[in-house]
Amino acid sequence: MIALDTNVLVRFLVDDDALQADIASNLINHPDGVFIAKTTLLELEWVLRHVYEIDKKKLASGLSGLLGLPTVTVECVVQVAQAMGDFAKGMDFADALHLASNHEGVLTYTFDKKFARLATPGRVVLATRKATSF
């Protein structure tokens, strides 16, 4: 198995450099399989959204397609699947991945109202003075 860096995955998905896209395609089809770390996915989503300005719906579809390839193994697949589900529902990908990576039953405190609203009830709490009265 080999691991791929974010820039290889970007070339594979965006295909904006013919030579590198061809190399990336060959790598993604490596006979021993490909490993993608959670941190690589986090960076990949950021680059595609901020540098290439790909909208969330297309981004979610592209990431899902990548992760569904038969040669791809992703780190902590259950966590990533949960994060992808929350991302598809409108949550920021980084927030979704952080939340999915937390231990079961652990509350996440945030100042981000949208994150708290989109999270599964009982998983994220808005950080207020009242919320910090333990």
Image: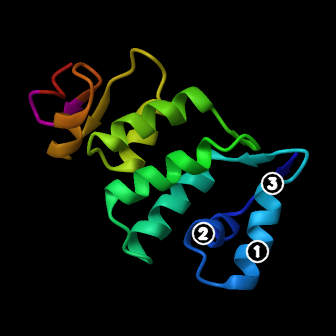
Q: CA distance from mark 2 to mark 1?
A: 12 Å
Look at 54% across and 61% down and name the residue there: 43
* Residue 108 on image: x %, y %: 32, 31
Badge 2 amino acid: Val
Q: Which residue is mark 1?
A: 22
* Residue at 64% in and 73% down: 11
Q: Residues within 10 Å of mark 3 (few under 14, many from 20)?
A: some
**Along the line of sight, which residue is nearer the eye, 93 or 64?**
64
Q: Is residue 53 above or below residue 130?
A: below
- x 41%, y 51%: residue: 60
**Residue drawn at 39 percent across, 14 percent down:** 105
Where disc 3 sits, the SS reads loop
User: Upstream in the sequence, badge 3 or badge 1?
Assistant: 1
The amino acid at mark 3 is Asn
Indicate which disc, 2 or 1, sits on the residue closer to the N terminus: 2
Question: Who is closer to the viewer here, 90 or 94?
Answer: 90
Q: Which mark is residue 50?
A: none
Q: Secondary structure at mark 2?
A: helix
Q: Which residue is mark 2?
A: 10
Q: Is residue 83 magenta?
A: no
x and y, in percent, of residue 41 in the image: 57, 52
Q: Which mark is residue 29?
A: 3
Distance of label 3 from label 2 (alpha carbons): 15 Å
- Determine if residue 112 is in view: yes
Query: What residue span does the magenta drawing correspond to?
Result: 125-130
